[in-house]
Image (cartoon, rainbow, N blue to C red):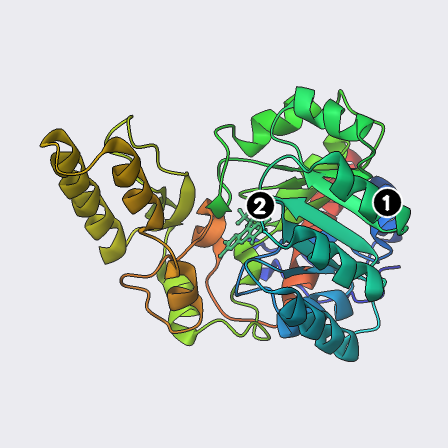
Amino acid sequence: MLACFHKEDYAKGNNFIWKADMQAYSYLNSLWQRGKDFLGVDVPILAGAMTWVSERYLVSAISNAGGFGVIACGAMEPHHLDEEIRETKKLTKRPFGVNLITLHPALNELIEVCIQHRVSHIILAGGLPNAESIKAVKNAGIKMICFAPALALARRLVRMGVDALVIEGHEAGGHIGPVTTSVLAQEIIPALKEVPVFVAGGIGRGEAILSYLEMGASGCQLGTRFVCASECRAHPKFKQAFIRASSRDAIISPQLDARFPVIPVRALENEGTQKFIEFQRQVIQQVNAGEVDLKEGQLKIEKYWAGALRRAVIDGDIETGSVMAGQSVGLVDKEQPAKEIIEELIAQAIITIEMREKVKIA
Ligand SMILES: Cc1cc2nc3c(=O)[nH]c(=O)nc-3n(C[C@H](O)[C@H](O)[C@H](O)COP(=O)(O)O)c2cc1C
């Protein structure tokens, strides 16, 4: 039985009558048992790390609700990460992970901080990790999770000793790859059985989680859906932007000229997006006129969004800041406790299973 589950009728609007169905529970449990064992939680739903958003309060709330919270290290210095882990541990006794960016100049020190704190899981994001980082994590007995953007890379990561994979599709919030979640799932899940696979990107409801579990996933990772958790310390304006937005507002950062590639990031379209287009136009003109060289132009474009996520999440500048959000933002319509969000996701999965049983009986 799921420890955190409440028998509430979440689907009243659809005229379903809630009835606790032990068969449905056991079926769901059997589907995600591998994920539960791997993460050491009741509910193998990871709240994907979100820089500036995934800090001690959100992370502990997710873990206390039975899910798996993940601290986003982002650009934190080692002493900041040390403090964040220490404070998170005061708020929860349950497992949580730490997400580190491979490009961080102090990656080795950050791994050392995690080792000192005996963090159970490290999630390495932002590119293929090097063998040295993997070795340091594994030697410390920490479970290592990495992102796999394609089957060949997934296989390579497994050979390198990674313990589990997250496959994250194009619909997700933040930095994204070119392939959708549904296609990545079909490419990787049936072909890769060696390690647990968690699916991320565009997931906002329990029915979708159930479908990926039935394909063979061990659990799912959601980011956007957890931004409006009451415990999340993001600025109220940031949360309001999520509640107001529809799926189509979460767009990929525009790129005007192939000579100046823009790292694809999904965020809510705002004044900042328009200014970014104008800025690129100016840089292109300067380069074409020979006033600025190609390299300098590229650097200028790369630096445009520096500090913009912090401005949006912490200061509430949702006009010119970077309001990173996935397409599932259209499914976020209110602020609610993390526990309630997790219970709702489980209820949606359970109701789907129960309804099948009813159809079979009829
Ligand atoms: C505001 C925001 C910031 C994010 N920051 C990070 C990050 O620092 N590291 C990371 O690996 N993923 C980051 N992500 C991706 C999430 O961890 C998660 O994988 C993604 O949100 C899942 O897709 P969804 O948004 O469709 O639920 C971020 C996403 C958002 C929305």
Point out which mark residue 138 bears: 1
Which quadrant: the C terminus?
top right
**Residue 35, percent from left and from top:** 82, 45
Q: Is residue 122 shown left or right of residue 255?
A: right
Q: Residues within 10 Å of mark 2 (few under 14, many from 20)?
A: some
**Residue 157, percent from left and from top:** 74, 30
Work out whether 22 lies above or below 254.
below
Name which quarter of the figure residue 152 lies in. top right
Name which quarter of the figure residue 299 lies in. top left
**Residue 222, percent from left and from top:** 61, 51
Which quadrant: the N terminus?
bottom right
Q: Nearer the viewer, residue 220 or 123?
A: 123
Q: Residues within 10 Å of mark 1 (few under 14, many from 20)?
A: some
Q: Is residue 28 shown left or right of residue 102?
A: right
Q: Nearer the viewer, residue 253 or 306?
A: 306
Q: Is residue 178 shown left or right of residue 361?
A: left
Residue 226 in sight: yes
Q: Nearer the viewer, residue 141 or 359?
A: 141
Mark 1 and mark 2: Cα distance apart in space: 19 Å
**Residue 355, percent from left and from top:** 71, 44
Residue 13 in sight: no
Tell me the SS state at disc 2.
Answer: loop
Work out whether 60 lies above or below 35.
below
Q: Residue at x 24, y 48 (%)?
A: 276
Point out which mark residue 103 bears: 2
Q: Mark 2 is on which residue type?
A: Leu
